[in-house]
Amino acid sequence: MKIYERVMHVVEHYIAPMAAKVGSQKHVRAMRDGFITAMPFIIVGSFILIFAFPPFAEDTQNGFGKAWLSFATTHFDTIMMPFNMTMGIMTIFVSLGVAYSLARSYQMDGITSAALALMSFLLVASPVKDGGLPTGHLAGTGIFTAVICAFFSVELIRFLKKHNITIRMPEQVPPAIARSFEMLIPVLVVFMTLYPLSLYIQSQHDMLIPDAVMEMFRPLISASNTLPAIIGALLVSQLLWFAGIHGAAIVVGLLSPIFLTNIGANIDAFVAGEPIPNIFTQPFWDFYIFIGGSGATLALAILMVFSRSVHLRSLGRMSAVPGFFQINEPVIFGAPIVLNPLLFVPFVFAPIVNAVIAYFAVQVGFVGMGVATTPWTTPAIIGASWGAGWTLTPVLLVIGLLIIDLLIYLPFFRMFEKQLLEQERAVSEPPAKAKTTAGTGVTA
């Protein structure tokens, strides 16, 4: 208990307050909202990519596989067009979403701010060449630049407004027209700052700003694929959840640029037929580490279904189906897991065990690396296969990890169940009636 008390002291007095500040910080929230905006396009694009690259070998004898391969080869460009217009330009959606969210948090006009952010990003990431816009940096390699341009554009507008550096129109002018004139100076400032910077980097280093930004973030991207970094991220998430704070929302919000950058690089390698480089992607996080949600609680929900405790059995029946779809708030707050010392160890360490096993399973080639982003509510057994290109081995790994999670949770669950059973018996059994000895008035 002393170790548990020390851990909770650190969480409550240091980690939780810092996480609360980070989670409520405007730029972090804007970044999270921006990636949520892009997610539907990314998911559809991922689905199209798998359809264009069937999970069958070229020499397959399977009739369905041969027909699919033939169709995909014949109509490859047509099939890939939706991918190119969704995942292929995902940074456009990210830029718009991040700028809009940040502008609204400052009570500013979201549409004009988003438009300026998009122009700023295209100016430095996709300058016109041969009469067209190059798309090389509109996918994963432009993620960090898109976020930076969104922040810069919104903060620029805010700075100019704060210091009254703007064009004010008479009150009789319609608001839409007045807003357009207000944007003239911010647009000019962007051209006077970002464009010369882009030209300088091109002339001196023969690269665009997104290339330079990726060089700056390359150590972070490389570190994200290491097992200590993965364990560190999920430990922070789990400790925050245990303290009652939505750890996944904070941690994933910060990890989203890395997830999208890594999956973008994996997709480029997948399409080019090259080795896939990155382990740490959203499918890895969602479907190998957190089977059933944060804490890998699908195993706990299954154990609850067969519990002798009325409370746990009822909760298990209510939460098993949501848990299958990666939704586990009923378990976390209903059991409860939050601030429950009996479930602290499995809740924190089951995901760590999953991460270690899955990491080495990917490294040795038993399962493939992620090449598709899927909805986080996809059942793990399906999402893992989908994310790796519809292969079978991820299904086997998820089943194996779920069995291990059951074994990790079982002894702690039994202790918790025993405690609840004693409480339920105390409530259900009426107190013994006092016996009075006849004729004496003495209570026995």
Image (cartoon, helix red, strand yellow):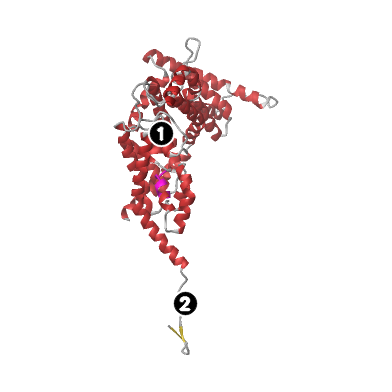
Q: Which mark is residue 385?
A: 1
Say which of 10 and 353 sits in front. 353
Give the x, y percent position of residue 246: 45, 44
Secondary structure type for disc 2? loop
User: Is the C terminus in the top left, top right, bottom left or bottom right quadrant?
Assistant: bottom left
Instruction: Indicate yes or no whether the magenta region holds residue 14.
Output: no
The reply to whether residue 38 is visible in this rendering is yes
Residue 392 at x, y = what percent? Answer: 38, 33
Q: Quadrant of residue 234?
A: top left
Q: Nearer the viewer, residue 221 or 262?
A: 262
> Which residue corresponds to the image point at 39% horizontal and 44% vertical from the top-left?
296
Q: Amino acid at mark 1?
A: Ser
Q: Is 222 located above or below residue 311 in the figure? A: above
Amino acid type of the residue tagged 2 in the rendering: Lys
Q: CA distance from mark 2 to mark 1?
A: 62 Å
Q: Earlier in the sequence, mark 2 or mark 1?
A: 1
Judge whether residue 233 can be spotted in this image.
Answer: no
Circle 1 Cα neighbour tier, 10 Å, few/some/many (<14 / 14–19 / ≥20): many
Left/right of residue 123 with respect to residue 167 in the rendered view: left
| Count of number-bearing discs | 2
Q: Label 2, on which residue?
A: 433
Give the image quarter of residue 420: bottom left
Kindly state the secondary structure of the residue where label 1 is placed: helix
Which residues fall within the magenta stretch? 294-301
In x, y percent, where is residue 298?
A: 42, 46
Q: Position of residue 189 (x, y in %)?
A: 52, 20
Q: Which mark is residue 238?
A: none
Q: Is residue 344 above or below residue 383?
A: below
